[in-house]
Amino acid sequence: MINPVASLVTAAAQQMRRSFHGKAQHTESRQSQFLQTLLRTYQDTEMGRQLKLTAISSVDQFRAQVPIRPYADYEPWIEKAAAGKANVLTPDPVTYLNFTSGSTGKRKLIPVTWRSRQFRVKATNTSLFFALGAAAQKRQTSLGKILLTSSIELEGHTSAGIPYGPVSVGDLRQNNVFKRSLMAHPLMALEPVDSLARHYVCFLFALANPRLKVIGANFPVLALKLCEHLEQQAESLLTDLEQGTLASWLKLDEGLRSQLLTRLKAHPQRAAQLRLQRQQTGRFTPQMIWPHLNFITTALGGTSDFYLKRFPDYFGDTPIFGGIYASAEAVFGAYHSFNNDGAVLAIESGFYEFIPPEQWDVEQPKTLLAEQVQVGECYRILVTNYNGFYRYDIGDVVEVVGFYGKAPIITFRHRRGGLLSSVTEKTTEYHVIQVMQTLMAEFEVALTDFCITLSKEETPPPYLVNIELQMGDAIANPQAFLERFDQELQTIHASYAVKRRTQVPPPQLRILQPGSFATMRQQMIAQGIPESHLKFPHISEDRQFLTNLPVEQNITLSRPLS
């Protein structure tokens, strides 16, 4: 029987995709219209008056008159808005402040208004319609529920009473009734402060639904953590699913526990079915529990590829979808297909400029517009949006991988400044992730995680290749592994190859004890970084980073390579 709601949603998705494609054919004019409308709307704010926005009548004039700025230049203005002063950066009242995690730099506050949120939602909806279209192509047309496990706990309130917290918290708290109805659990299931308790409660609701369609996680590493929790708590979960109970050991506020118990029901048949499958397979994975999954949605680009290599073990061939490429400050793109890390520039959510590499060290660089970029080239991306930012430099480096109509398709590669240099070679996370993926395949070994640091004992310092093997794995020839790391990095990174011949010392391999990276993550969380937004670096110039972790084995090269 055809589901009328699903049919309506599919038809709406097709219409929205056609509409967006038509707009993408006229990217230049759409971007110009977006900018002019924003400038007229914001011209009477304090920032707008300082920038003399009323005098700007063209894109070229905007680029000539308004300087490129980093977050530090906005901070005094944001502090005034956070304290409750009106009309500072935005004409609309600030209703929320996105609070960045701080895992890749200083924590930031980003003003959010009802208007700025609508433009973020527009990009989210565009990506949703792309996802529904991709699912329809696979004949996965039915509308279904999504499992989420990220927290909705606020960080706090400003002196003016404005709530602040991670961007995902603000998005979830402000979701409309329709989007909340798509969740496999009530919103209150995301309230537990304890991470394990929150995952557990969300699992219980989702386990009752054999036709779950989507699993969402902010980052791939969190999707893997979700899977680990699921397998580790399988027996307890099945008992609670069978009886409609909540394990007494869960760290839950008693009031919340009581509310959750009123929503939980016993599902003895479903529990018996899952218990039998677990006994037969020895596993308790999402692909076994929910065989009708349409896709997994999580962040793509950057460091994601390293963790995505482990997805088949838990999700089989379930497609991966990126949703939106965004930060706390802005939306940059909407993903348009499964298993593709290219996002279509969000031409309806911001005005974008691109800085070519030869201009990166210029104080006020010349920029390119969306239709002027070239496929295969990397650029630093700037954004002007309704959060009150003008030509804002977040530091993201993106690669243009194609075009959708005349809108560029971009992939996040790394954050500028996130570089590793023994001398001046400028190694990026993208470089080392490519190398590690090659080595894992070549040596048939799985890594829990890795991070390349610099020695604090030598000048210039050698690279320290810190790795943690998955339980039960071993490298038969660590010396060969290290040699291949050195060779492969020289192959893909010309600057490293040149400097390695005469200046950069041979790298060293440090095999860390099991649980080392979990310990580091807990330390970062204890420092105040929200778990759902923790981005663990794969390179670090902090020479104290990882130094206190126990090392199982140290390996050096027996001969220098050049």
Image: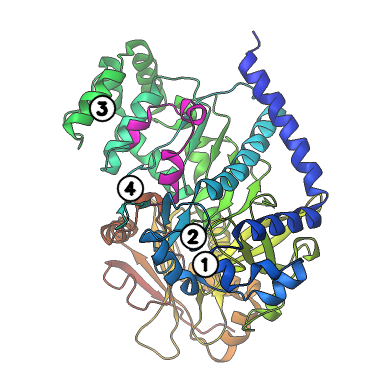
Tell me the distance, in whole angstroms, between the alpha carbons under discs 1 and 2: 6 Å
Helix, strand or loop for disc 4: loop
Q: Crowding near pointer 1: few (<14 within 10 Å), some, many (20+)?
A: some
Image x and y of residue 344, in percent: 70, 50
Which label sits in the foreground, 2 or 4? 2
Magenta-drawn stretch, dominant element (helix, strand or loop): helix
514 w.r.t. 145: above or below: below
Q: Which residue is mark 2?
A: 87
Query: Residue 46: which disc?
Result: 1
Name the quarter where the N terminus is drawn: top right
Q: Residue 218: where, in percent of width, then height? A: 47, 47
Q: Amino acid at mark 2?
A: Asn
Residue farthest to the top, as pictured: 1
Which is more N-terminal, label 1 or label 3?
Answer: 1
Residue toward you, 282 or 275 = 275
Query: As displayed, is residue 387 above or below residue 24?
Result: below
